[in-house]
Image (cartoon, rainbow, N blue to C red):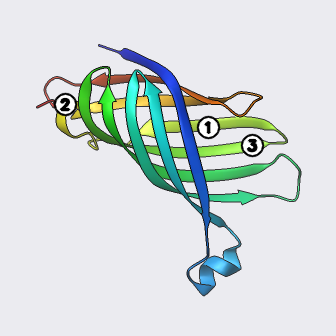
Amino acid sequence: MSQHATGAFDVKVTPQKPDTQVARAANIGRLTIDKRFHGDLEGVSKGEMLAIQTDMKGSAGYVAMERVTGKLNGKSGSFVLQHSATMTRGTPAASITVVPDSGTGELRGISGKMSITVAADGAHSFTFDFRIEPQLAE
């Protein structure tokens, strides 16, 4: 059975220095992600992002992985989200998906997709459509 969760989150994204000559030559930004979720998902996430901005204003791309830990609609555990996103001259397109078999605890067997909205004032919110397969749940 499909479930739905919504809420807001606070995020701190911190640039990291390139740690190899290859990373410096690629000129790709590496950042850490530190989030706190509120709403139907109460918890935190930690992760990393690789991002690049192009010479065209408003065009960019990023990929990221983050481990979310907390309570989702009252069930405790963790899972991993995989991000792939682009911005084409200001128009965003993103795919944020639960990594298969990454769920732990009561969230074992979780699958789904999350979408993120950033308001004009910078406030972040999420919508998460997910399933927890009973045969995989603990």
Which residue lies under the disc numbered 3? 87
Q: Mark 2 near mark 3, Cβ–Cβ under 8 Å?
A: no
Rate crowding at label 1 as few (under 14), some (14 to 19) or many (20 or more) other CA atoms within 10 Å: some
Residue at image location 66% in from the left, 65% down from the top: 29
Query: Which corner quadrant of the image does residue 137 belong to?
Result: top left
Q: How far apart are marks 1 and 2 (CA)?
A: 27 Å
Horizontal side of 100 relative to 115 (left or right) equals left
Quadrant, the C terminus: top left
Q: Which residue, given by chain and number where applicable, does mark 2 sit on?
A: 106
Q: Which amino acid does label 2 sit on?
A: Glu
Sort mark 3 into few (<14), some (14-19) or many (20+) by Cα contacts within 10 Å.
some
Residue 52 image point, x, y percent: 71, 59
N-terminal of the pair, mark 2 or mark 3, is 3
Give the answer, above or below, for where 66 lies relative to 72.
below
SS at mark 1 in the image: strand
Q: Quarter holding the N terminus?
A: top left
User: Is 48 left or right of 137, judged from the image as shown?
Assistant: right
Identify residue type, mark 1. Answer: Ala
Whichever of callouts 1 and 3 sits on the residue coming sooner in the sequence is 3
> Residue 111, percent across and down?
34, 31
Tell which tag, 1 or 2, sits nearer the viewer: 2
Q: Residue at x 57, y 52 (%)?
A: 63
| Front one among 87 and 36 | 36
Residue that carries the numbered disc 1 in the rendered image: 94
Identify the residue at the far bottom of this view. Answer: 21
